[in-house]
Image (cartoon, rainbow, N blue to C red):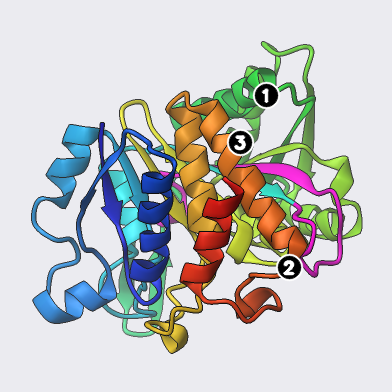
Amino acid sequence: MKAVLIPGDGIGPEIAKSVEDITKAMKLDIEWVKYQAGAEYAQKTKEVFEPGLVDAIKEYKWALKGPTATPIGTGFRSVNVALRQQFATYANVRPIRSFKGIDSKYENIDLVMIRENTEDLYKGIEYMINENMANGIKLITREASEKICRYAFEYAKINNRHKVTAIHKANIMKYTDGLFLEAFRDVAKNYPDIEAQEVIVDNMCMQLVLRPETFDVLVAPNLYGDIVSDLCAGLIGGLGFAPSGNIGDEYQIYEAVHGSAPDIAGKNIANPSALLLAFALMLEALGKLTEANRLREALAKVVEEGKTITPDIGGTASTSAFTQSIIEKL
């Protein structure tokens, strides 16, 4: 099969090479078709996507994306947001699992953050009222809310998880978040064997820090999901081990959600773990469960041993040496 590989900005090409090397080492029947996107490409060409990228995803249905930089305050909107809206990948799925050998404040974390991916304030409907006043529209629909909540409960059912927690601020935003919460309650009625819980977003942040082990699957509108998913990544040591999948009815785009780290780009010291774990999610979705688990286990063993790990997690190894160690474990 063919799939699109978007290396991205900064360290993106280096960690994308890890994926290519491991694809070859595992003898997977995946042919990567590479396209450029992001700030560096835009700076050179004035275009955010390389011509043919969108058509390639439409044709192949599957894509894996490295980190892309987004200008703050000016310039184009996020490549991630643009792709999610272009391909209606309505569910953002981010598993959060602890790795032995990583310096973090918690152990045995096993959460899944499921975030609505197409609307809310990220719809980008904003305008200037006058030179001193701007307005952004928070768009929440019943259809999208029910769809993401149903996805969360189905995910829990298929993966033998026992609780789904809705994150909201319906105490203040009674129409928008109120509609999301109403949709959650309606969907929950169809899953009597799965516990349905509701937590206000600010309290949710506190509870995740105090007792993360009490949560299982989390579901949220777009903005809260974005913020809380990064908080969850902090529970396991950072975004370097937080893979992400953007799931739609027709298309699936997997990605590393950490930054492009331009300060270390080209030095061959970047940690490819998040992109490799995103690749494992993709393999899982393709039905290659054995291969996905092999990759995760090999990566986990290399990290736990701590002999050939990258500087961000306390080692001195290069990206390529880290990748080679995973290949040897495979």
Q: Type of residue at label 1? A: Asn
- Residue 88 point in image, percent of width and height: 33, 37
Percent of width and height locating residue 21 = 39, 55
State the residue in front, 312 or 324.
324
Distance Cα–Cα, label 1 vs label 3: 15 Å
Residue that sits furthest to the bottom in the current view: 263
Q: Secondary structure of the magenta portion, mostly?
A: loop
Who comes first in sequence, dot 2 or dot 1? Answer: 1
Front-most of residues 216 and 74 = 216
Question: Looking at the rendering, which quadrant does residue 100 occupy?
Answer: bottom right
Give, as a single range, the part of the protein colored magenta: 98-122
Residue under numbered circle 1: 159
Quarter in which the N terminus is drawn: top left
Of pointers 2 and 3, the one earlier in the residue sequence:
3
Question: Nearer the observer, disc 1 or disc 3?
Answer: 3
Q: Mark 3: which secondary structure?
A: helix
What residue is pinned by disc 2? 306
Q: Amino acid at mark 3?
A: Asn
Tell me if mark 3 has few (under 14), some (14-19) or many (20+) residues whose alpha carbon lies within 10 angstroms of its own. some
> 286 or 46, which is in the foreground?
286
Q: Residue 158: x and y, percent?
A: 64, 19
Seen in the picture, residue 311 relative to 235 is either above or below; the reply is below
Q: Residues within 10 Å of mark 2 (few under 14, many from 20)?
A: some
Q: Report whether residue 172 is seen.
A: yes
Identity of the residue drawn at 31% across and 37% down: 30
Q: Is residue 94 magenta?
A: no
Amino acid identity at mark 2: Gly
Give the residue at mark 3: 293
Q: Residue at x 54, y 58 (%)?
A: 274
Instruction: Tell how many labels.
Output: 3
Spatial separation of the CA atoms under disc 2 and disc 3: 20 Å
What residue is at 77 percent from the left and 11 percent from the top? Answer: 192
